[in-house]
Image (tube, rainbow, N blue to C red):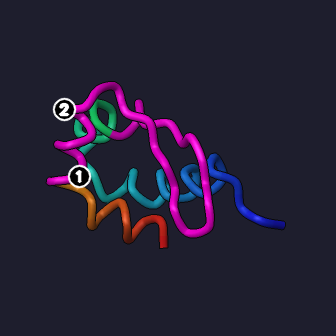
Amino acid sequence: MEPTAQSLWDAAIESLRPLLNQEVFRLWFAPIRPVELQGDRLTLAVANEFCGVWLGENYRDVIDNALK
């Protein structure tokens, strides 16, 4: 069965949780919602543009690794 955006993100979140400080996880990662999975591209929804930029600048590699 093909993974869905939600199942892929759920697996990534479970691998991220132990790597991150609990407050960082709660503030920055818990609110993220998967929107769409097309091929190897997962679209995630964040609260606002600032959150997206901040996460991209500070955690993109961590998120990418968790999704692999």
The local secondary structure at tag 2 comes to helix
Looking at the picture, which amino acid does disc 1 mark?
A: Gly
Task: Write the residue at 23% across / 52% down.
Answer: 56
Q: CA distance from mark 1 to mark 2?
A: 10 Å
Can you tell which quarter of the image residue 45 is in? Answer: top left
Please name the residue that numbered disc 2 is placed on.
50
Contact between labelled residues 2 and 1, with CB atoms less than 8 Å apart: no
Query: Residue 57 or 41: which is nearer the viewer?
Result: 41
Task: Write the residue at 23% across / 46% down.
Answer: 55
Task: Write the residue at 61% across / 59% down.
Answer: 38
Q: x, y percentage for residue 15? A: 45, 61
Quick check: 35 above or below 63? above
Quick check: 65 above or below 48? below
Q: Is residue 1 left or right of residue 59?
A: right
Q: x, y percentage for residue 30? A: 41, 35
Looking at the picture, which amino acid does disc 2 mark?
A: Phe
Q: Looking at this view, name the residue that lies furthest to the right.
A: 1
- Residue 55 covered by magenta stretch: yes
Q: x, y percentage for residue 11? A: 57, 57
Q: x, y percentage for residue 35? A: 56, 40
Can you tell which quarter of the image residue 2 is in? Answer: bottom right
Please name the residue that numbered disc 1 is placed on.
56
- Residue 67 covered by magenta stretch: no
For the record, the magenta segment spans 29-57
Mark 2 closeness class: few <14, some 14–19, many ≥20 residues within 10 Å: few
- The quarter of the picture where the N terminus appears is bottom right
